[in-house]
Amino acid sequence: MKALLDTCVIYPTVMRQMLLRVAAQGVYTPLWSARIIEEWQRAAQKLGPEGVAQAGSEAAFLRLNWPDAEVTWPASLEDRLWLPDPADTHVLAAAIAGSADVILTLNAKDFPRNILAEEGLSRADPDSFLHGIWEAQPDLVVKAAQEVLAEANRLSGETWEMRGLMKKARLPRVGKALAIQPG
């Protein structure tokens, strides 16, 4: 399965790390475009120079570790597409060009299911997507989440609880599932 990651699911660090750590275990292939990465970089400017530098190094890390994830397309593809927000047609074009099965986004209203279905695509929010993977392969998601939690604790100097970290990352169903996970 191939999933196109919209900017809004790449920019929050914990959400991005959860999605990519699960992908690294072979569950799905992540995709994005240069424009999606550029949007992430622009959004990071709100965090100041340190945020920009961190986002730049993380984007370089993504490209290094996922060299085939970045898709391109001819302008004619984007020109034929329509979405309620014209600024999002590049996301749909990237998904089509990458032969994605699903667009992972938090912006459901901007990606109507009927329009996506015409292109052989669906959409999912990251929480539902990861929760579905947890239902099928709980150990895989637990492993990814433990790695993300350890990294969050290391970087923040705080001690996060799994459910709280996932809730803050807009992954509440995953957090609840992981909180009741035995062991």
Image: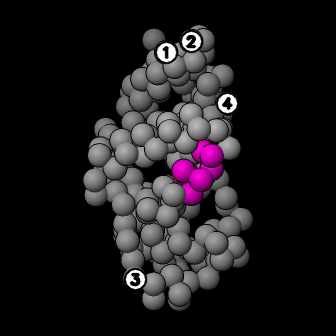
Q: Which mark is residue 154?
A: 1
Residue 57 image position (x, y, % from top left): 42, 40
- Residue 181 is at least partly visible in this image: no
- Whether pointer 2 and pointer 1 mark residues with C-beta atoms closer than 8 Å, the reply is yes
- Whether pointer 3 and pointer 4 mark residues with C-beta atoms closer than 8 Å, the reply is no
- Whether pointer 2 and pointer 4 mark residues with C-beta atoms closer than 8 Å, the reply is no
The amino acid type of the residue labelled 2 equals: Gly
- In the image, what residue occupies the spot 65% across and 38% down? 47
Residue 149 image position (x, y, % from top left): 50, 21
Question: Judging from the image, what secondary structure is the residue with disc 3 in?
Answer: loop
Residue stretch rendered in magenta on the structure: 39-45
User: What crowding class fits label 4: few (fewer than 14 Cα within 10 Å), some (14-19), or many (20 or more)?
Assistant: some
Q: Indicate whether 132 appears above or below 141.
A: below
Q: Which residue is mark 2?
A: 157
| Tag nearer the camera, 1 or 4 | 1
Q: In the rendered view, how is the structure colored?
A: one colour
Residue 127 image position (x, y, % from top left): 59, 42
Distance of label 2 from label 4 (alpha carbons): 16 Å
Q: Indicate whether 47 appears above or below 84.
A: above
- In the image, what residue occupies the spot 69% across and 73% down? 85
Q: Earlier in the sequence, mark 2 or mark 4?
A: 2
Left or right: 109, with 178 as reference point: right
The amino acid type of the residue labelled 4 equals: Lys
| Tag nearer the camera, 3 or 4 | 3
Distance of label 2 from label 3 (alpha carbons): 46 Å
Q: Which residue is mark 4?
A: 168
- In the image, what residue occupies the spot 36% across and 41% down? 61
- Residue 82 is at least partly visible in this image: yes
